[in-house]
Image (tube, helix red, strand yellow):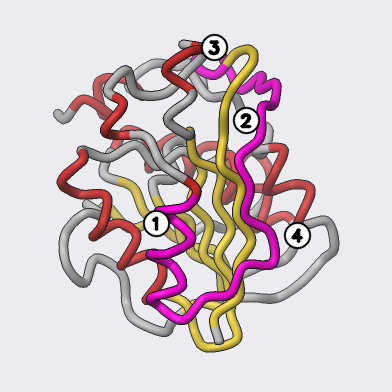
Amino acid sequence: MNQWDERFDVEEYIYGTEPNVWVKSIFKKKGNFKVALLAEGEGRNAVYMAKLGHDVTAYDFSQSGIDKTHKLAQSEGVDVKTQLQDITIPDALPKSEYDIAINVFGHVPPAGKSEMIRNFAESVKPGGYIVFELYSRRQIEFQTGGPKDIHMLFDAGDMKRELESYGFEAIELKEVIVHRSEGRMHQGKSAVIQGLLKKK
């Protein structure tokens, strides 16, 4: 078992079962897009997107998380495909496969961040979108969730430059202070980077 298996191997949904607020603010209408969710954990965002009618695949490094994703999907009467996958290795996702890719609080080791972003960016078709909410480096001040290692956190300017190098243009990309209440693991004032970008 890896650390995520150990963390998720409880009955409780430690990040809750409700979708991330940023994701929910963007996706409100029914649709039929092909959607990838990276580092999806226990499945809350994947199940939400499936309930909107999308063709959803959740990628995560934890079998415990994937099992809980299927359990949540079944309880909500939807289908979510899953892949047990380390998203920090080359070619972890198929290229130009998805209309939308979503990454909510994908915590990976510093050495894996660039490859995660590459997989995230390259999985989307031209004309497709990526959406993310990630903790910014200021989150160290708040200690309301996320990694304690500042090198695992993100900088908005760096994200913008890196994603532009993969052909994305920012519709929205901002660092904001928000209140998050997501299970017992994300509670309180939080410093996040929110992105909605389109691939040219």
Nearer to us: label 4 or label 3: 3
**Nearer mark to the viewer, of 1 and 3:** 3
Of residues 2 and 103, which is closer to you in this image? 103
In primary-sequence order, the first of circles 1 and 2 is 2
* Residue beneath disc 2: 17
Percent x, y of residue 161: 42, 64
Callout 4, which amino acid?
Answer: Leu
The image shows residue 163, relative to residue 165, as above or below, that is: above
**48 sits left or right of 60 in the view:** right
Distance in Å between CA atoms under marks 2 and 3: 11 Å
Going from N to C along the chain, the mark reached first, 1 or 4, is 4
Magenta part of the protein: which range? 157-186
Q: Which residue is mark 4?
A: 52
Residue, disc 1: 82
The mark total stands at 4
Q: Which residue is mark 3?
A: 184
- Between the C-alphas of marks 1 and 2, the distance is 17 Å
Query: To which quarter of the image does residue 131 belong?
Result: bottom right
Q: Nearer the viewer, residue 123 or 137?
A: 137
| Mark closer to the chain start, 2 or 3 | 2
Badge 3 density bin: few <14, some 14–19, many ≥20, Cα 10 Å: few
Q: Residue at x 48, y 33 (%)?
A: 135
CB-based contact (under 8 Å), mark 1 and mark 2: no
The furthest residue to the right: 29
- Distance, label 1 to label 3, CA atoms, is 24 Å
Q: At which x and y percent is residue 115?
A: 23, 60
